[in-house]
Amino acid sequence: MTTLKESLLYAFWRVCGLVNLHRDMINAKYQHTEPAVLIVTTALVTYVGQRVLCRLIYGEGFVPNVRRGLLASLRNLPIVRDYVHEQMDKIAVDVERSLNKCYAHCTFVLELPDKGWTPETILKRMAENDSLSHVEWKKGVVSGAIYTEHDTKLEGLMVSVYERHLRSNPLHSDVFVGVRKMESEVIRWCCNLFHGGPESCGSMTSGGTESLILACKAHRDYGYFEKGIVYPEMVIPATAHAGFDKAGEYLRIKVIHVPVDPKTMKVDVRKMRAAITGNTIMLVGSSPQFPHGSIDPILEIAELGLSYGIPVHVDACLGGFLVPFMDDAGFPLPPFDFRLEGVTSISADTHKYGYTPKGSSMVMYRSHKYHHYQFSVATDWPGGVYATPTVSGSRPGSVAACTWASLLYYGRDGYVEATRKIITTTRKIVDELRTVPGIQVLGSPDVSVVAVGSEEFDVFQLMDKLTSRGWNLNPLQYPSGFHLCVTLLHVAENVADRFVNDIRECTAEIMQSPRLPSTGKAAIYGMAQSIPDRSVIEELAHAYIDACYSTRYLPPPS
């Protein structure tokens, strides 16, 4: 012990001696330098160094930023740049040609006509446009997207309510008082569904992404004004909705993705704890997450947030009108909402399993102290004080009214019964798929999503075959797979059985030669995951979006 202490003491004095030696050398070298020059130089070097470190670390993190920078530098080499641009231009044309082949016999109205069209002409052209899609979604072949069943009574009610509130705008709350009242009632209903107390509150938004952006904005500003956090970070599961990444991009919040358990696809809470820093403004858990339908361990995340004093957001956008009713439907769940003290905000889409028209979602808070940081208030605008609770200023009051009417139409008993049907159908599909040789059910299908993968063959071959049979499914990556989001349309007789039988038959065909190389779209999906430069995938996505806005038809090459 004495020898160790003596060694440490000797090392300490050696370090001090070296520090003093170099201090003397620096002082001797710059003793004739003007103090102003030293001050300015030090400030400049500190500023540049700080900017470089922020550039490297802020955003995706040090390693991804360095990798992205190196790949970008490589792509900017003249010979590489010219080749890549040439190939990407060709791919963009191919994407547009493939996506818009349905326009072969169409004409586009490229300029606003001088004279208005008659209602009959408008409706005729609208019918022509509606006929372009050949996906028979009314037969239940689409994953998610359309959540309600064919209820002509409900649809008639929606048309009537929408027509009555066609011109209403909640921004003018003193003019459209009825809409204001209906929106307030919907918010209170939803807060109560998620066991919010008397201080719970929230806002109606245009969809899940806006709900997530607003929750991130509220927690970012809460972190800044209450804790002085200048470089905000949020810690989210790798499976959390991409809307959080969008919020990070919009709001300049660093997004830290935490790995999930490869078997259950639930977030690893120990790794989430390790990702927390002094800049963490919020933790996130999904109930359930979109890719595999697994519910993250919300109780553990809430306890983690409570112990560190960090707000916790529960994203229930997908299952927000299933999970509150699962206990009554006979499928009990652990607490996931405001019953947990650490949960400070929740997002839930009414336009999914709430069966309201599209453009309706909810973001809720435990108390006003978080909700107020969501608001935007311009106090000095010459047009007056401009205060808005959401991203949009003007909003369609007709959507708020339809949401109010839809929830009243179903009532609690109606939602419990719909939940019972959907969860029963989902569990039936899962049980059947687990008996199919070569098929793997990914994650823990806790709610309404069934994710399918395979360790025996390229699962995108199976997805291609199912697409050729009329199914419209969601592809997944990391790991490869696809999923079916079960809705009331799949509850109908034979739809779930047809899905399982189609998978069974197609899988049997593939298993005859499971190692054959993939072709067509299956090969493209597989290749997309293996490309190290993700900016290439970004450019392909840009080409796809550009093609969606295209007003031309490109004939096949001769």
Image (tube, helix red, strand yellow):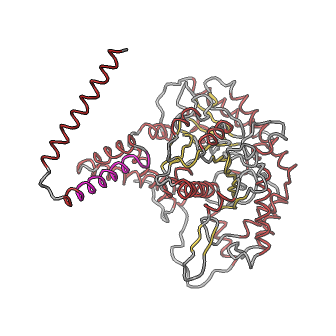
Image side of residue 292 versus residue 53, left or right: right
Q: Name the residue: 75% across, 76% down.
A: 176
Q: Name the residue: 58% across, 54% down.
A: 219
Q: Which residues are magenta?
A: 39-60
Q: Nearer the viewer, residue 107 or 372?
A: 372
Q: Nearer the viewer, residue 278 or 81?
A: 278
Figure check: 60 above or below 172: above
In the picture as drawn, the residue positioned furthest to the bottom comes out as 115
Q: Name the residue: 86% across, 54% down.
A: 411
Q: Is residue 56 magenta?
A: yes
- Expressed as whole percent of the image width and height from the top left, the position of residue 266 reads 62, 34
Residue 453, picture quadrant: top right
- Expressed as whole percent of the image width and height from the top left, the position of residue 338 reads 73, 47
Residue 102, picture quadrant: bottom right
Figure check: 548 above or below 512: below
- Expressed as whole percent of the image width and height from the top left, the position of residue 328 reads 85, 41
Image side of residue 93 versus residue 398, left or right: left
Image side of residue 29 versus residue 233, left or right: left
